[in-house]
Image (cartoon, rainbow, N blue to C red):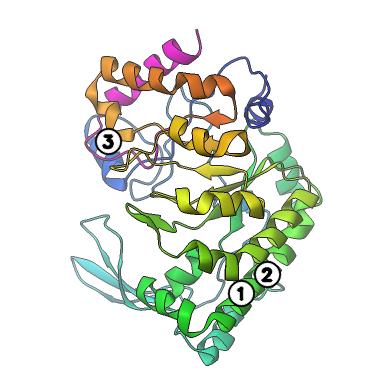
């Protein structure tokens, strides 16, 4: 089997020759540590994606954020500029107009000094210029070449399918969007509708010319205690727009819609399934101990899972890794799940522990 056939068979509850080994990258600090340990990451140590590790399948995340160069579905402008710089930090105006402080000696999340979007119609009307679906910068001059290049790669084809909540939250801030949902629901509804229109128009040409395996929708909308908005808000505002976007992707031959939620997401899962979402990612185990078997017992085979392995077990040694992976095996045998570490690998995990994980993974699942 090639990588695409294996991926698609699993998420269609069909048999495979083996279970693929993937992960979801690392903290930047992890790459720094691995480099100090003598490992050549062969990618930027400030990035979260990668590296490609020997013994793992081709990184499913590689090229995903940029949709493999087929289109650009994020804010486009000429605003990016370093406004101030010292030995310790930079003050940066990002392409969406936000202003952030970036520490040079740490890879922590940038501190936002000014958000890109204010919770007003005037601000939104101005901001939409960064989301012009007709901007020629969104499309490569060599689209035919890009498509053929991707067709000739033996890897899973996942593209960035946009964001209906997470983008707005980033542009506005968690506090502002939380109030905004109640203060201006009609305007929020209009914004989400615009994003769906934008996403459909930007991606349509490329998707009509190449078969894709999954659309990755980034939301990061849940935390340790649950979602950042209620199921009632989801049903009132987001549901119809998700249905339209998911329906479009399916009409273009995209096999599965994958939603990245983070955190404890169970309260929203039945609504996502009804909207057309297929795969929940990364199904974090977390302090709430949300294991794949628990989630599958609630939602059955309608829910497909990408994740579910507690990343904190990996540095604990082969015996602990084996014990943990064996716990997942009954759910794995049902199909519809690819087990991977449930988020970025933190810096307390040596590269040797990852090699131990790969060895045990194959012993438990592929022998």
Q: Which residues fall within the magenta stretch? A: 340-367
The quadrant of the image that shows the N terminus is top right
Left or right: residue 294 versus residue 217 is left
User: What residue would you read off at disc 1?
Assistant: 131
Between residues 307 and 94, which one lies in front from this camera angle? 307
Q: Vertically, is 8 above or below 264?
A: above
Left or right: residue 47 versus residue 123 is left
Which residue shows up at 47% across the image and 25% down it? Answer: 56
Label 2 element class: helix
User: What residue would you read off at disc 3?
Assistant: 35
Answer with the quarter of the image where residue 113 lies: bottom left
Label 1 element class: helix
Q: Vertically, is 10 above or below 254?
A: above
**Of label 2 and label 1, which has the lower sequence position?**
1
Q: Vertically, is 191 above or below 255?
A: below
Left or right: residue 186 versus residue 200 is left
Label 3 element class: helix
Q: Are marks 2 and 1 in contact (CB under 8 Å)?
A: yes
Answer with the quarter of the image where residue 30 lies: top left
Between residues 190 and 289, which one lies in front from this camera angle? 289
- Picture coordinates of residue 229 (x, y %)? 44, 65
Between residues 29 and 344, which one lies in front from this camera angle? 344
Q: CA distance from mark 3 to mark 2?
A: 40 Å
Res 198 label: 2
Q: CA distance from mark 2 to mark 1?
A: 7 Å
- Picture coordinates of residue 259 (x, y %)? 55, 50
Q: Are marks 3 and 1 in contact (CB under 8 Å)?
A: no
Which residue shows up at 28% across the image and 16% down it? Answer: 318
Q: Are marks 3 and 2 in contact (CB under 8 Å)?
A: no
- Picture coordinates of residue 324 (x, y %)? 34, 22
Left or right: residue 218 versus residue 155 is left
């Amino acid at each position: 089997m090639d990588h695409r056939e294996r991926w698609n068979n699993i998420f269609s509850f069909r048999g495979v020759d083996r279970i693929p080994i993937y992960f979801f990258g690392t903290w930047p600090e992890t790459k720094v540590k691995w480099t100090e340990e003598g490992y050549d990451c062969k990618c930027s140590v400030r990035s979260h994606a990668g590296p490609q590790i020997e013994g793992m399948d081709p990184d499913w995340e590689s090229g995903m954020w940029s949709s493999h160069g087929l289109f650009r579905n994020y804010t486009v402008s000429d605003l990016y500029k370093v406004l101030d710089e010292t030995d310790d930090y930079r003050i940066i105006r990002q392409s969406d107009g936000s202003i952030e402080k970036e520490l040079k000696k740490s890879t922590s999340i940038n501190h936002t000094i000014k958000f890109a979007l204010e919770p007003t119609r005037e601000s939104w009307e101005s901001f939409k210029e960064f989301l012009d679906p007709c901007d020629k910068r969104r499309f490569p001059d060599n689209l035919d070449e890009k498509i053929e290049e991707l067709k000739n790669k033996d890897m899973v084809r996942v593209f960035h399918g946009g964001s209906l909540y997470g983008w707005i939250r980033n542009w506005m801030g968690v506090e502002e969007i939380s109030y905004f949902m109640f203060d201006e629901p009609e305007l929020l509804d209009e914004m989400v509708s615009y994003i769906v229109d934008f996403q459909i128009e930007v991606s349509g040409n490329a998707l009509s010319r190449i078969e894709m395996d999954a659309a990755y929708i980034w939301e990061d909308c849940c935390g340790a205690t649950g979602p950042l908005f209620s199921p009632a808000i989801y049903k009132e505002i987001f549901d119809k727009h998700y249905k339209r976007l998911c329906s479009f992707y399916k009409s273009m031959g995209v096999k599965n819609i994958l939603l990245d939620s983070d955190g404890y997401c169970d309260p929203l899962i039945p609504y996502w399934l009804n909207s057309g979402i297929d795969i929940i990612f990364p199904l974090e185990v977390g302090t709430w101990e949300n294991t794949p078997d628990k989630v599958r017992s609630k939602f059955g085979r309608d829910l497909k899972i990408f994740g579910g392995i507690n990343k904190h077990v990996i540095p604990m040694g082969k015996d602990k890794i084996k014990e943990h992976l064996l716990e997942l095996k009954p759910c794995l045998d049902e199909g519809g799940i690819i087990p991977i570490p449930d988020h970025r690998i933190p810096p307390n995990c040596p590269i040797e522990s990852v090699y131990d994980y790969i060895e045990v993974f194959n012993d438990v699942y592929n022998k």
